[in-house]
Amino acid sequence: EPEVTQTPSHQVTQMGQEVILRCVPISNHLYFYWYRQILGQKVEFLVSFYNNEISEKSEIFDDQFSVERPDGSNFTLKIRSTKLEDSAMYFCASRPGDTTNEKLFFGSGTQLSVL
Amino acid sequence: AQSVTQLGSHVSVSEGALVLLRCNYSSSVPPYLFWYVQYPNQGLQLLLKYTTGATLVKGINGFEAEFKKSETSFHLTKPSAHMSDAAEYFCAVSEGTSGTYKYIFGTGTRLKVLA
């Protein structure tokens, strides 16, 4: 089965630094997502992206966060100035098309640790 | 907005025993419901989904779930637990339409299988 690929698997950064988390969604998919999971808590929606723009974002996704699809294959999440509370597992996901019952395909995640 | 409640953050069963992981949802419209599994150091993998039709849904690895509208439940079961079933399990409900479609996850249940 095709896979969503995320890099790096682990990222350690200092508070206040910028980080970019990278994802390669499945090639014919049209909708892209970022979720995060703080240790011991539920998987939370951050943002969805379609047709080269954000279609929805959560309250968590403030001005410190941005997403980009720079080259038609990569999908990135940037955190401009990291905070301690940004430490979490970040999951990228994608889905093919426009049917609401289609499953999301998830990557294996990037564990972000902010020191 | 939709929401999902998973009762029991940790469940332990003996190998060979019945697995029952509970999920209740709230939704103002007929829901699409999903169970995902997360093995250590891996991403989220779809176990099964309910969209329409038969209320008993069979998934991978011998798991099944029954949609009960009257109880707003979608509990996950497996008749006989195997050591390899040890993982975290997430129930999710879909929300939105086309461009705003996303999943809302529960807090997860960590399943431990005892030898």
Image: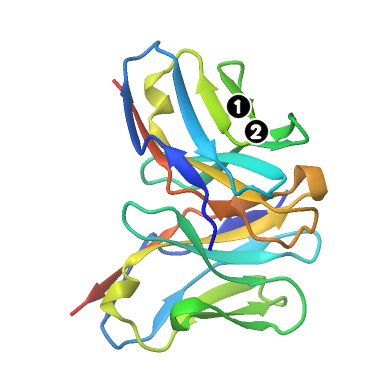
Percent coordinates x, y for residue A19 in the rendering: 44, 20
Residue that badge 1 annotates: A61
The amino acid type, in three-letter code, at marker 2 is Ser
Secondary structure beneath dot 1 equals: loop
Q: Is residue B102 left or right of residue B80?
A: right
Above or below: residue A106 compared with residue A44: below
How dense is the environment of label 1, judged by Cα within 10 Å: few (below 14), some, or many (20 and up)? some
Q: Could you give the CA–CA distance between mark 2 and mark 1, rounded to whole angstroms?
A: 5 Å
Secondary structure beneath dot 2 equals: loop
Viewer-proximal residue among A92 and A7: A7
Viewer-proximal residue among A97 and A14: A97
Above or below: residue A38 compared with residue B114: above
Instruction: Say which quarter of the image contains residue B58.
Output: bottom right
Viewer-proximal residue among B90 and A11: A11
Above or below: residue B106 compared with residue B50: above
State which quarter of the image contains the C terminus of chain A.
Answer: top left
Contact? badges 2 and 1 (CB < 8 Å): yes
Would you say residue A83 is visible in this rendering? yes
The amino acid type, in three-letter code, at marker 1 is Phe
Q: Residue, x 46% and y 40% (percent of image)? A: A6
How dense is the environment of label 2, judged by Cα within 10 Å: few (below 14), some, or many (20 and up)? few
Q: Residue, x 54% and y 75% (percent of image)? A: B75
Percent coordinates x, y for residue B3 in the rendering: 64, 54
Would you say residue B111 is visible in this rendering? no
Instruction: Say which quarter of the image contains residue B18.
Output: bottom left
Q: Which subunit holds the residue at mark 1?
A: A
Residue that badge 2 annotates: A58
Q: Is residue B69 left or right of residue B9?
A: right
Q: Residue, x 60% and y 57% (percent of image)? A: B4
How many marks are shown on the rendered structure? Answer: 2
Q: Which subunit holds the residue at mark 2?
A: A
